[in-house]
């Protein structure tokens, strides 16, 4: 089974086109002003339309956003997915899912096995989970910090859990990460950048190639491709 690939923090037409040319599955847009990958809603709307036209699923990534902000994003960007990367409770996650009728991906910050205990209340609510490394102390960014966690923690997850692996993934370690975790999907952002927020075509090529090479040797959990 081939791993789903999400390239996050896209902000230019060129990056969208490269992701599509590489047969990635999902394009993520960051709506968080403290992030170097933040995009304005109008910009994201145009990029999302381009991405859909190239066969990419679009993901709007927010951090603890209120209904007013989400209303604007959903109306203008028309994302295929909403990714919640803040401290959204199960109740808030369910409310967002019901309000917009869109699949929801809920992110969790992981450092130790106990962090995985928090996912149980989201079962049956979030359509997909995303496991990212905990941000370093003092960081304003919940993700995109280029840090990884112990992938062995995920090997014991129930096979029915649909998730993506994120956090510090690069062309050099993504094959190992897939081999250890058996993740059905990966999410990359800083690992394909030449500078914060600047996607590098060559790094994108190398990352996707590394994932596809791992596809031939690594058994995956029951995930699904998004295209």
Image: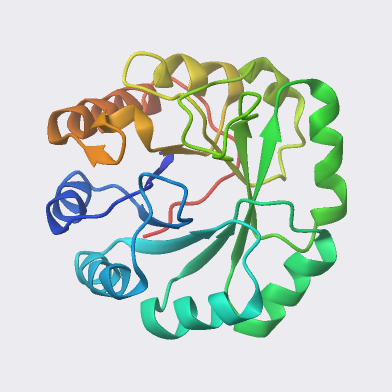
Q: Nearer the viewer, residue 163 or 142?
A: 142
Q: Nearer the viewer, residue 47 or 220?
A: 47
Q: Nearer the viewer, residue 104 or 218?
A: 104
Q: Is residue 1 visible?
A: no
Q: Position of residue 109 (x, y in %)?
A: 68, 35
| Residue 117 placement, left or right of 200 | right
Quarter assignment of residue 142: top right
| Residue 77 to residue 150: above or below | below
Name which residue lies at 66% across and 24% down.
137
Quarter assignment of residue 133: top right
Q: Position of residue 29 (x, y in %)?
A: 38, 58
| Residue 134 to residue 20: above or below | above
| Residue 187 placement, left or right of 51 | right
| Residue 201 placement, left or right of 117 | left
Q: Quarter of the image containing the C terminus?
A: bottom left
| Residue 133 to residue 10: above or below | above
Q: Position of residue 119 (x, y in %)?
A: 80, 44
Q: Is residue 176 visible?
A: yes
């Amino acid at each position: 089974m081939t791993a789903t690939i999400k390239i996050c923090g896209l902000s230019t037409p060129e990056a969208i086109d490269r992701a599509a040319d590489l047969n990635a599955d999902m394009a993520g847009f960051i709506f968080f002003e403290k992030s170097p990958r933040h995009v304005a809603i109008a910009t994201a709307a145009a990029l999302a339309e381009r991405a859909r036209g190239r066969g990419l699923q679009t993901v709007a990534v927010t951090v603890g956003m209120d209904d007013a902000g989400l209303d604007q994003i959903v109306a203008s960007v028309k994302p295929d997915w909403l990714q919640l990367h803040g401290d959204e409770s199960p109740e808030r996650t369910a409310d967002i899912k019901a309000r917009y009728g869109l699949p929801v991906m809920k992110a969790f910050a992981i450092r130790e096995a106990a962090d995985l205990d928090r996912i149980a209340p989201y079962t049956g609510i979030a359509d997909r989970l995303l496991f990212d490394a905990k941000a370093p102390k003092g960081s304003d960014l919940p993700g995109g910090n280029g840090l990884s966690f112990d992938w062995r923690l995920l090997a014991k997850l129930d096979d029915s859990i649909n998730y993506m692996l994120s956090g510090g993934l690069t062309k050099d370690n993504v094959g190992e990460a897939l081999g250890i975790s058996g993740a059905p999907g990966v999410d990359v952002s800083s690992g394909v950048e030449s500078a914060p927020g600047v996607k590098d075509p060559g790094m994108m090529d190398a990352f996707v190639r590394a994932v596809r090479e791992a596809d031939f040797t690594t058994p995956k959990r029951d995930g699904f491709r998004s295209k």
